[in-house]
Image (tube, grey):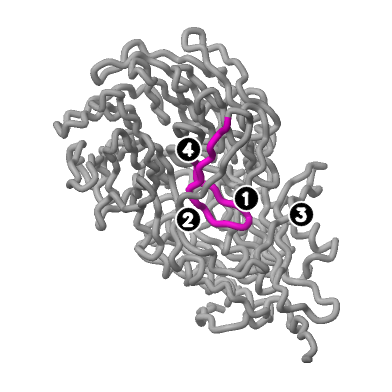
């Protein structure tokens, strides 16, 4: 009988892993929004293997098929981030084609019919967030007009579904609009509005109007006290209006009196039902029969609440909730499974039946490499606390020698009004399975901990978010979970700004990776898209009055503080953070002789969608970190050109 072979001894960072960068995208789809139409389930899926193209699918009678043509790319560019690019009603699909931003009507098996005219300029009229009138004659949509005369105009429009192209404006009384929702009888329309400099998670208003024959009647503000963010309005099947508001600290669900605007709590508690509407079409509550169902966002992950009771389910990330004839459906993921279409049948006596009618691929990793993170709460500056998710190095085939401590990768999420994702992420397990710890930081300003925590970043961007990432790294190093000499930090967009600031103003991290990060706050304030054009007014201060603050916090003005190597990754067509932001910092580092690598991905926008680019970016980061920190990752990696 042979002796059992124990784990091999290899340094942290050099463990052999079966999770390749290619496994992140091979056969993978990014499941987007879900819709219920009768007994059919419809959803969108983005496919990295097809250059990030988004298709719309339908499941009927146990059979799944793609409804959009093979050359269709369903994506809207409203607010640049998009979302809400399609809708279905009575087996008719309405969608935005990415190439021209026009709305098309498609009956399955037929050919797409344009419903909006050709815009005066390329992609000049963009559409999102549809509602279909009960009689099927009208499509209500958000339109963003780029007519070349100053700032784009955002408005509500009525689009005839007969193909006449006779689009009419319903309302344009604010800088921004979202979530137009028609009552079940089609006689009332509600929507959310807000104005510069607020973002939709700061201060919004709920409006209501009569709707008849493609026009609104008597529009009026219904709810909005000037200090609350209303979102996710919707109607129950019996015609009652509901909305989420954070006026009492948490984004909870309330019933709305359509005459007086009085709010009555429907489902409340110390949890977030709604999430920041960075994209259109978000929904985290539904009413099915007599049941009120919602998502309760908690530190360890989402929970499902039905009629005030929390139900045990394996889904820790729940989005796009819709009512079905006997329950609900949603897109659900967990620590042990990737996003899938999930249905939950609600019984009369409190029981549930959870089913997964559609999954998208077999999980391409061994179960013993999966890490369920530990929520952390730790002290940070100013006698405050911050939060994070801790993923320790995990690979049962290997152990590290002696008393070696692992390298640590600190992740700074984007937004900055976002949060660490509560679901399995192969992009994190890619690191942990190689012997590298990961901490995903919910710095002050993150969602999921109430309005006060989210607003703690106001006026403090580039200060408290950076301090919290530094504090997370120090916390883990001090308790022995990380090597204080091998601390890494990575982030994208707003998280990239946090990375640059951490390297410019602190001597804690040995190396960093910035993905399309902000280097110059003044450039961001004066050269970005409309949706975020005034975001820095809240996060930093009014521009240009607070010019000195912008300069003081912009990493590009403090290149003398950069003495740690960095890899910078950028999309060539990014309109949100243009390439010049990354190129400024690369040039400054190169001029100072600090090792720097720069990868520009042509054709990519804000975030990488192509499979080849996703793989190239991740492998380049691992190769760069290994080169700088002195560990040799197992397996072949591309050679990264390092400018010194």
| Residue 65 image offset from top left, x and y in percent | 32, 53
Callout 1–callout 3 Cβ contact below 8 Å: no
* Crowd around label 1: few <14 · some 14–19 · many ≥20 (10 Å): many
Residue at the top extreme?
Answer: 260
Using the numbered discs, state the Cα–Cα distance from disc 4 to disc 1 in whole angstroms: 17 Å
The magenta stretch is: 329-347
Residue 339 placement (x, y as % from top left): 52, 53
Which mark lies nearer to you, 3 or 2?
A: 2
Asked which quadrant contains residue 70, the reply is bottom left
Q: Nearer the viewer, mark 2 or mark 4?
A: 2
Up-down relation of residue 594 to residue 108 (above or below): below
Q: Label 2 belongs to which residue?
A: 359
Q: Nearer the viewer, residue 518 or 164?
A: 164
Determine which quarter of the picture holds residue 426: bottom right
Instruction: Of the two numbered discs 4 and 3 on the same chain, state the one appearing first in sequence.
Output: 4
Q: Which residue carries the number 1 mark? A: 422
Q: Which residue is mark 4?
A: 282
- For the point 33% across and 19% down, the residue is 186
Decide: few, some or many residues near mark 4? Use Cα within 10 Å; few <14, some 14-19, many ≥20. Answer: many
């Amino acid at each position: 009988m042979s002796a059992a072979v124990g784990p091999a001894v290899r340094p942290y960072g050099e463990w052999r892993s079966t999770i390749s960068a290619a496994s992140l995208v091979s056969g993978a789809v990014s499941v987007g929004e879900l819709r219920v139409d009768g007994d059919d389930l419809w959803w969108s899926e983005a496919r990295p293997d097809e250059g990030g193209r988004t298709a719309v699918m339908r499941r009927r009678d146990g059979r799944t098929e793609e409804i959009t043509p093979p050359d269709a790319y369903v994506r809207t560019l409203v607010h640049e981030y998009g979302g809400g690019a399609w809708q279905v009603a009575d087996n008719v699909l309405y969608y935005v084609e990415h190439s021209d931003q026009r709305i098309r009507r498609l009956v399955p098996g037929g050919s797409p019919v344009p419903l909006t005219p050709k815009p005066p300029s390329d992609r000049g009229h963009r559409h999102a967030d549809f509602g279909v009138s009960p009689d099927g004659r009208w499509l209500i949509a958000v339109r963003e007009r780029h007519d070349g005369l100053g700032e784009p105009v955002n408005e509500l429009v009525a689009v005839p579904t007969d193909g006449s192209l006779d689009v009419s404006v319903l309302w344009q009384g604010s800088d921004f609009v979202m979530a137009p929702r028609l009552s079940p009888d089609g006689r009332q329309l509600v929507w959310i509005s807000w104005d510069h400099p607020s973002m939709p998670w700061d201060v919004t208003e709920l409006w209501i109007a009569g709707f008849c024959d493609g026009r609104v009647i008597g529009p009026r503000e219904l709810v909005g006290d000037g200090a609350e963010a209303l979102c996710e309005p919707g109607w129950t099947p019996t015609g009652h209006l509901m909305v989420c508001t954070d006026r009492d600290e948490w984004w909870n669900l309330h019933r709305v009196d359509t005459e007086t605007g009085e709010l009555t709590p429907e489902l409340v508690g110390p949890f977030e039902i709604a999430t920041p509407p960075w994209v259109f079409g978000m929904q985290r509550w539904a009413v099915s029969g007599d049941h009120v169902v919602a998502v309760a966002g908690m530190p360890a992950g989402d929970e499902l609440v039905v009629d005030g009771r929390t139900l045990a389910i394996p889904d820790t990330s729940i989005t796009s909730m819709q009512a079905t004839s006997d329950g609900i459906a949603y897109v659900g993921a967990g620590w042990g499974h990737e996003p899938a279409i999930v249905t939950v049948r609600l019984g009369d006596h409190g029981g549930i039946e959870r089913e997964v009618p559609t999954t998208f691929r077999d999980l391409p990793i061994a179960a013993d490499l999966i890490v369920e993170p530990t929520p952390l709460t730790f002290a940070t500056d100013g006698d405050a606390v911050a939060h994070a998710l801790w993923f320790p190095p995990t690979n049962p085939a290997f152990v590290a020698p002696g008393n070696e401590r692992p390298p640590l990768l600190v992740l700074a999420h984007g937004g900055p009004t976002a949060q660490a994702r509560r679901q399995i992420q192969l992009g994190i397990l890619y690191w942990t399975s190689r012997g590298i710890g990961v901490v995903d930081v919910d710095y002050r300003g993150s969602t999921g901990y109430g309005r006060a925590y989210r607003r703690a970043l106001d006026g403090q961007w580039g200060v408290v978010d950076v301090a919290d990432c530094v504090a997370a790294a120090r916390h883990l190093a001090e308790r022995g979970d990380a090597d204080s000499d091998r601390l890494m930090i990575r982030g994208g967009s707003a998280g990239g700004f946090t990375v640059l600031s951490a390297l410019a103003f602190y001597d804690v991290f040995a190396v960093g990776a910035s993905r399309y990060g902000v280097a110059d706050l003044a450039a961001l304030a004066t050269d970005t898209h409309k949706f975020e054009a005034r975001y820095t007014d809240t996060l930093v201060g009014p521009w240009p009055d607070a010019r000195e603050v912008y300069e003081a916090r912009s990493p590009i003005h403090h290149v003398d503080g950069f003495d740690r190597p960095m890899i910078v990754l950028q999309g060539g067509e990014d309109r949100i953070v243009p390439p010049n932001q990354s190129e400024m910092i690369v040039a400054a580092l190169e001029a100072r002789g600090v090792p720097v690598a720069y990868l520009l991905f042509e054709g990519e926008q804000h975030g990488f969608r192509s499979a080849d680019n996703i793989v190239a970016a991740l492998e380049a980061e691992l190769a760069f970190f290994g080169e700088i920190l002195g560990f040799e990752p197992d397996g072949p990696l591309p050679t990264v050109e390092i400018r010194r």
